[in-house]
Image: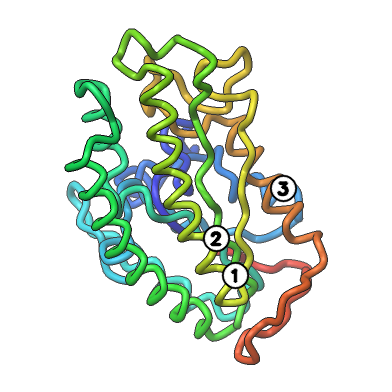
Amino acid sequence: MGDSTAAGVGNPRPVQPSQLDTACQRSAGTYAADLGQIKNWRVLNLGCSSATIPAGILGPQGLRGVTAPAQLAVARKATNASYVIVSIGADDLGWSALLRLCTVTTTCDDRPSTAYFQQSLAAFTVRYYQLLRRLAALPSHPTVLVNLYYNPFDPRQHCLDGVGLTPAKQKSLTRLLGALNSVLANGARASGQIPVRPDFAGHALCDAVPYVQGLTASAPFHPNLAGQLAIALADVQALEQPRTQTVPSRSRSASPRSGSRSP
């Protein structure tokens, strides 16, 4: 479940998409689909472009011509689910708007924009912890993975200078992204859940073999097919690592089950 990263925006569409698939811009090439093939899982992808915690995860999301039901409500019906994987936060913080603003301003970390980001992050943190409690209360008590955000920037490269994203601005955006990822990781660990950090180092937008879509693509900065696979492999690696932390008693320790489902 989650936002445009989970939906796979910009990658090939499903062969027979539903109205909701089209409205959410869901792709056939997502990390959820990759996990289904790698782990032989039955997978249900609830990701939707522009989803936030209040409008998308915990509540319905209004889209063009259709309303997506709350993803958590749908997940609650998957009573045999062994795993839930979540990608959320960027739209809650207005990341796309922040990225666009950064291209036309002198700096990305002036005092007003930094203060606004910090306020947005504080509000998101409250909603995120509410979400974590709701995930822990799902009927099947699935193992929950929280995917952190990949870094699409490589400040050593200069292919983004022409659109106003200088290496200095990319470093500023990377710090903001790191702040979001710290909230995601700390919350997951505190709740006995698993944070997963996909590593796109050497595969940023300006690198020779990028894991993100380029500026002329339909969804710039979003993971391409290789990036989606990299996220799936990071999830697999996280699941294969031994758990060393104490899991809250209300969360059942889940092991891979044949034919399991993952929202």
Q: Which residue is mark 2?
A: 185
When asked about the image quadrant of residue 118, the answer is bottom left
Separation of residues labelled 3 and 2 (CA atoms): 26 Å
Amino acid on which disc 3 is placed: Gln
- Which label belongs to residue 37? 3
- Specify whether 237 is left or right of 188: right
The mark lying in front, picked from 3 and 2, is 2
Instruction: Give the image location of residue 210, x and y in percent.
Output: 58, 21
Other residues around mark 3 within 10 Å, as few (<14) / some (14–19) / many (≥20): few
* Marks 1 and 2 in Cβ contact (< 8 Å): yes
Check the image and report above or below for 131 versus 229: below
Dot 1 falls on a residue whose secondary structure is helix
Q: As displayed, is residue 231 above or below residue 223?
A: below
Asked if labels 3 and 1 touch by Cβ distance under 8 angstroms, the answer is: no
Mark 2: which amino acid? Ala
Residue indicated by mark 1: 189
Residue at 26% across, 44% down: 114
Looking at the image, is 35 positioned above or below residue 161?
A: below
User: Residue 59: where, in percent of width, then height?
Assistant: 28, 70
Q: 33 above or below 55?
A: above
